[in-house]
Image (cartoon, grey):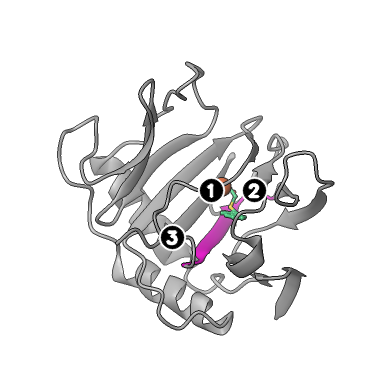
């Protein structure tokens, strides 16, 4: 079932539940070749979230800035291609939310350990902000903060749980958002982790 969070933000609860095990096994396969790593922000801080990517482009950050790269900076090789099951589900989710020409070519995979968080930020490193972002959450639940176009706008809290998919487009595309520290727990599918995949179209 589908819930409108804000203009352009559509939550598809449990949309990825049936494919969860398959998607998580693809995530394991990707991370065997391109391991999760804690990247460094331009300000010099190590992120508490561990990240890897698949697809043509991967999001990376280091002292020189945020960007999308066709190469994994750790291995110097091209990222693993996006598993078809992930691509198809992301396209289907976007289409349910009214975005019918979404062709994701970047998938950022975030791994949260207990206590990991993502501070309030905007996603604006993508060249065409008319394309939505599709996110899929697995494993431990997270309290997601969703605000407005200014950092100081008031935020609403939403729980994101195993199998939830959210499409962020239109007016919500530049909204501030973040993840509060993951609480201690255990999920049968991921153990003491939360896994989040975000699908974006760069080209
Ligand atoms: C709202 N990830 O990777 S997913 C990110 O759970 C990111 O790992 C969080 O924020 C996570 O950039 C949140 C939900 C999400 C993703 C992208 C958005 C919400 C968004 C872009 C615009 C507005
Ligand atoms: Fe984000």
Q: CA distance from mark 1 to mark 2?
A: 23 Å
Look at the image and give the residue range highlighted in magenta: 131-141
- Pinpoint residue 43: horizontal percent, then vertical percent: 50, 19
- Pinpoint residue 15: horizontal percent, then vertical percent: 58, 74
Q: CA distance from mark 2 to mark 3?
A: 20 Å
Task: Between residue 84 and residue 186, name the one nearer to us.
Answer: 84
Could you tell me if the residues under marks 1 and 3 are in contact, i.e. CB atoms within 8 Å? Answer: no
Q: Quadrant of residue 2?
A: bottom right
Q: Quadrant of residue 81?
A: bottom left
97 lies left or right of 149: left
Give the residue displayed 48% in from the left and 56% down from the top: 198
Q: Can you identify the residue that label 3 sits on?
A: 199
State which quarter of the image contains the N terminus.
Answer: bottom right
Beta carbon at label 3 within 8 Å of ligand 1: no
Q: Residues within 10 Å of mark 2 (few under 14, many from 20)?
A: many
Give the residue displayed 81% in from the left and 51% down from the top: 157
Q: Nearer the viewer, mark 2 or mark 3?
A: 3
Secondary structure of residue under mark 3? strand
Task: Between residue 25 and residue 180, name the one nearer to us.
Answer: 180
- Pinpoint residue 85: horizontal percent, then vertical percent: 36, 71
Beta carbon at label 1 within 8 Å of ligand 1: yes
Secondary structure of residue under mark 1? loop
Q: Earlier in the sequence, mark 1 or mark 2?
A: 1
Prevailing secondary structure of the magenta residues? strand
Secondary structure of residue under mark 2? loop
Q: Is 8 situated above or below 203? A: below
Q: Can you identify the residue that label 2 sits on?
A: 140
Q: Nearer the viewer, mark 1 or mark 3?
A: 1
Q: Can you identify the residue that label 1 sits on?
A: 123
């Amino acid at each position: 079932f589908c819930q409108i969070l804000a203009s352009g933000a559509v939550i598809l609860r449990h949309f990825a539940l049936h494919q969860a095990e398959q998607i998580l096994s693809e995530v394991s396969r990707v991370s065997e070749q391109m391991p999760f790593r804690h990247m460094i922000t331009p300000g010099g801080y190590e992120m508490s979230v561990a990240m890897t990517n698949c697809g043509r482009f991967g999001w990376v950050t280091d002292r020189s800035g945020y960007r999308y790269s066709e190469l994994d900076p750790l291995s110097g090789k091209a990222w693993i291609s996006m598993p078809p099951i992930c691509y198809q589900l992301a396209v289907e989710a976007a289409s349910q939310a009214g975005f019918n020409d979404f062709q994701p070519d970047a998938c950022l995979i975030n791994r949260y350990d207990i206590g990991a968080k993502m501070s309030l930020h905007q996603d604006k490193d993508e060249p065409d902000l008319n394309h939505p972002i599709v996110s899929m959450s697995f494993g431990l639940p997270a309290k997601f903060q969703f605000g407005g176009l200014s950092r100081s706008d008031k935020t609403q809290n939403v729980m994101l749980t195993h199998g939830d998919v959210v499409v962020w487009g239109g007016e919500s595309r530049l909204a501030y958002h973040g993840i509060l520290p993951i609480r201690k727990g255990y999920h049968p599918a991921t153990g003491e982790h939360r896994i989040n995949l975000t699908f974006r179209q760069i080209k």
